[in-house]
Image (cartoon, rainbow, N blue to C red):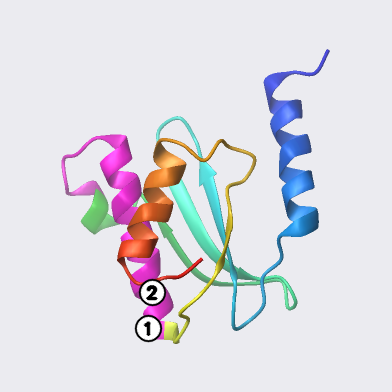
Amino acid sequence: MNTKLEQRQKIRFRIRKKVSGTALKPRLSVFRSNAEIYAQLIDDEKAVTLAASSSREKDIVAQKVNKTEKSKLVGASIALKAKELGIAACVFDRGGNLYHGRIKAVADGAREGGLQF
């Protein structure tokens, strides 16, 4: 029987078969650990990270809010960095996690920041 991690890894690979980013429309990859959340804009053609944001950044750590609200701030932060790079649209990669809770909060924060999926 597969462990929870092995199942998530299979889901990640299945998603990555379909989802790919370019320089004009990068992939917004989200990684969620128990304590933190990380988001990256990735150009898969060149295998380069264009921008990154996490809940460990000083301005996000300074705000005393729960993890879901921090995730929304991470989404807004990555959207701001994308705007500075001139990126208006991206494809969302939930990283094998359910589109729910903190993953959904990152997506909502990015949308409110002006990124289109």
Q: Residue at x 26, y 43 (%)?
A: 69
| Residue 52 percent coordinates (x, y) | 47, 64
Query: Up-down: is 54 above or below 24?
Result: above
Question: Which range is magenta?
Answer: 61-84
- For residue 1, say whether it is visible: yes
Q: Residues within 10 Å of mark 2 (few under 14, many from 20)?
A: some
To which residue does mark 1 refer?
Answer: 84
| Residue 55 percent coordinates (x, y) | 35, 49
Residue 77 within the magenta-colored segment of the rendering: yes
Looking at the image, residue 58 sits to the left or right of residue 25; the answer is left
Per the image, label 2 sits on a secondary structure element best described as helix
Which of the 4 image quarters holds residue 36? top left
Per the image, label 1 sits on a secondary structure element best described as helix
| Residue 113 percent coordinates (x, y) | 31, 68
Q: Residues within 10 Å of mark 1 (few under 14, many from 20)?
A: few
Q: Residue at x 18, y 49 (%)?
A: 62
Residue 69 within the magenta-colored segment of the rendering: yes
Task: Tell me the amino acid under the disc marked 1.
Answer: Glu
- For residue 36, say whether it is visible: no
Task: Tell me the amino acid under the disc marked 2.
Answer: Lys
Q: Residue at x 45, y 30 (%)?
A: 34
To which residue does mark 2 refer?
Answer: 81
Q: Residue at x 32, y 50 (%)?
A: 72
Farthest residue to the bottom: give it.
86
Q: Main secondary structure of the magenta part?
A: helix
Looking at the image, residue 94 sits to the left or right of residue 78; the answer is right
**Cα distance in 3D space between marks 2 and 1:** 5 Å
Q: Are marks 2 and 1 in contact (CB under 8 Å)?
A: yes
